[in-house]
Amino acid sequence: MRGRRVAGSIDMTRGRGAGGPHGSRESVLVAPGDDLGDSKELEPGHGVIVVDGRLKAVKQGRMMKDGKNVGIQPRRTAYVPRPSDLVIGFVEGMTNNIWFIDIGAPFNAILPLSLGPSKASFGGLRSVLDVGDAILCRIQEVEENHSSVATMKGMGLRKLKTGAVESVDPHLLGRVIGSKGVNLADLKEKTDTRIIVADNARVWIDGDVSGIISARAELGAMMKKAKVSEYGGDV
């Protein structure tokens, strides 16, 4: 939320008994440190830990309860790469035979010369992809520490030379696409643009200038509506 305090140091058990949010179906926003209930009666889920017999939030977001399990759906999430994901990345640097690609994850992906878009001589990577270039690629493999290897060997994988790239919150990506792709199809038709929604929550929009501007505005409105629906109030 902008210009509004989401949550302070509060006791989520207030008004519900010492056991915590039993039977609660309401949307409750919590912040790190908030008390969510008694660990003897409830089990910690994602974003929740036990401190001195009490459940404590360690993330900011919406509290979710599934039976005895209490977790938090984060307000902000980071993209976690998986093999075969289609991603939009930006070249951040390079060595003689490797590009470093920002894919919006905790760690940059590496794009080896052998998996690049075209042949380049050793040390001549800049002539193929330079710092700041946007690319459409796939995640080929992911290491245990979540670092990843990307590839541009595949149909449609390429340098993005035109258009604009927008970013959305990863957990709201489904709202852009919609059920069976309805929202995405409507956005393309309404703005007369070409749009690719990547798995790392980046959206490539291409077309004439007026169409791109319109699509960006529509996407922004869609995300604002999704956040209001998700968290309540003005976001």
Image: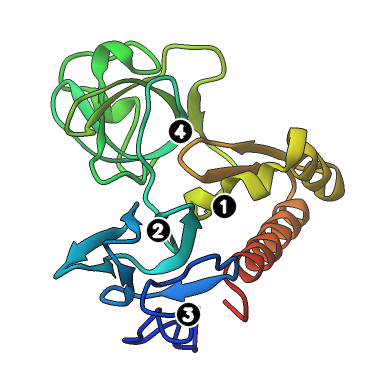
Please identify the quadrant where the C terminus is shown: bottom right
Between label 2 and label 3, give the one nearer the viewer: 3
Choose the circle earlier in sequence order: 3 or 4: 3
**Residue toward you, 148 or 31:** 31
Instruction: Give me the C-alpha separation between circle 1 and circle 3.
Output: 30 Å
Choose the circle earlier in sequence order: 4 or 2: 2
Choose the circle earlier in sequence order: 1 or 2: 2
Residue beneath the point at 37% across and 27% down: 82
Circles 4 and 2, Cβ within 8 Å, touching? The answer is: no
Choose the circle earlier in sequence order: 2 or 3: 3
Choose the circle earlier in sequence order: 1 or 4: 4
The correct choice, above or below, for 173 with respect to 75 in the image is above
Q: Secondary structure at mark 1?
A: helix
The correct choice, above or below, for 165 with respect to 230 in the image is above
Residues packed near mark 2 inside 10 Å, few (<14), some (14 to 19) or many (20 plus)? many
Amino acid, disc 4:
Val
Q: Which residue is mark 4?
A: 87
Amino acid, disc 2:
Val
